[in-house]
Image (cartoon, helix red, strand yellow):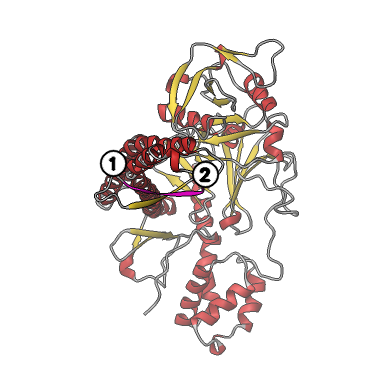
Amino acid sequence: MEQEACAPFDSLVLCAVADELNQILPGGQVQDIRQPDREQVCLSIRTREKTLYLLISTSVRFGRVHLVQQRTANAPLPFGFCMTLRKRLENRRVLRIWQKEADRVLALEVGGGEEPPYTLIAEIMGRHSNLVLIDEDGMVVDALKRITSKINRVRETLPGRRYVWPPVQEGRIGPLQFESLAVLFNNLKLSEVGSVEQLSAALLENCTGISPFLAREIALRAIETGDLPGAWQHYWGNALNRKFEPVLQLDAEGEAAGAYPCTLKQTSVERQRPVAGINEALQQAYHIRVNQLQTGEAFTRLRGRMQSELKRVQRHRNAALRSLEEAEIHEQWKQAGDLIMGSLWSIPAGAKQITLPNYFQEGAPECTLELNARLTPQENAAHYYARYQRGRAALEIETQRVERLQQEEDRLHAAMQQLETLQTEQEAAALERRLGVEGLLQQTALAEPASKEKEAEFGGHKIRRVRTHEGYEILYGETATANDWLTSRIAAPSDYWLHVRAAAGAHVVVRTHGKPESVPRTVLLEAARICALHSAQKHSALAVVDYTLKKYVRKPRGSAPGAADYTRETTLEIEPGK
């Protein structure tokens, strides 16, 4: 039985996409550019008939270029690369679209107006995928992934550097070099090829621009017909002549699993459905595949977070139970103090222990009490009384703590059971948000690692950046001078400014882009948590954090670095250790 593999987005698919796009997009106006995340860009292009949405993804697993039915959502705060594209490409017209030498590289040339044209180059190459904007002189304007010389000495992709096309594999034949291919096919005699696997391996070894999936397709057709050149022509000859017959590949349940510009040999006829265009097929296939992957990843990630939180709660509850057991014997310390106070006359100075009758038990059995030889008998009794007071106070606290942790554990178990009944990623996200609001899951955001490039962005000062799950940017200083620089040079008047009350700590800024009223409370709570964790109150059970608009913050004249006065503040209470 033939193996049914999922059709990839390879150079042959890109060839068909480029052909379709070149028929409908030239002359269209780029009206809107969105970047929902760090891997995707969506261009809204208005043609004479309608507005089309071109998605470009540099995802390692799902890198692709094709039209989609609706534009993607926008990030709350635009990425720098998106801002560059908007400045250079919006309100200009698509001139042409072309593929680079049957490789997985697509170029979109945009021009018109007074400025010279720009070319947006999509390199769909797995983990090396990138999206680069170059000017008419071939100089890099910006890149989705900036590649330094430390990463790639040959292809440094940075603004101001000359763009270098992806290298061609030396010693291999391109898919459209038919004369050289004829010599290769003459040497690869089908009568001497043992199997489809051997022929596809030979094609991959000697040819460039073909995927393992396409190599197997060609091998299957060649062995079936006994004509290797004809099999190659069926794919690349038709591609050269722009003769495509796109199909939608279906899985066992009849759902879209992949798309290809021609009928497939390694997929049964029942699992192939002809479609009008390759863009339509790709939109259907990847919409389902990406949603399934994202849903699975969302469920797995949330399940992992809940399990980690459950282990943490159980660990703390066990510790609280041990503390509770110790607190429950606090009456023994009071009795020990009373016994010592009733026998002061019989305790010699410097004694390390004393054996006394225990009048609190029936029959007054003897008991041995440990003493501190450096303390007087009265001081030893006071020490036992102090232990009694701490134990009595801890008993109430630890009892409440055990009850609270038990409730959290029960609620987490219930939430995990609820997760197993959910179906969509949106339902899982709603559950995750609810658990975060209820305090059962930490609402975390990851800080970007410090680097020379990041420090240079802030005048060389140690200022860290955090991007929340809602897309907002939080900045905080790591030194007093960095705090001054952040507050006086970086923060805008309408940004939120936070500081822990009456204690030393970092200045924290939430960038609002002129809309402070739109910032969710969860973002302010996250900023307050960061503020508390980078202050002298980081080990406190409760920290009070003030926040106000930056325009109400001033630095007193002649004050030390990091000092600031503020007014019109609002208070948040944060548990740094929670």
Asked whether residue 172 is in view, the answer is yes
Q: Is residue 415 above or below residue 526?
A: below
Q: Is residue 364 above or below residue 383?
A: below
Indicate yes or no whether the magenta region holds residue 76: no
Q: Is residue 352 above or below residue 169?
A: above
Given residues 288 and 310, the one toward you in this image is 310
The magenta stretch is: 349-358
Instruction: Name the residue beneath numbered marker 2.
Output: 372
Q: Secondary structure at mark 2?
A: loop
Instruction: Name the residue beneath numbered marker 1.
Output: 403
Residue 404 x/y as whole percent: 31, 40
Residue 204 x/y as whole percent: 59, 73
Residue 97 x/y as whole percent: 57, 46
Quarter placement of the C terminus: top left
Q: Is residue 183 above or below residue 538?
A: below
Tell me if mark 1 has few (under 14), some (14-19) or many (20+) residues whose alpha carbon lies within 10 angstroms of its own.
Answer: few
Residue 332 x/y as whole percent: 34, 44
Given residues 372 and 262, the one toward you in this image is 372
Q: Secondary structure at mark 1?
A: helix
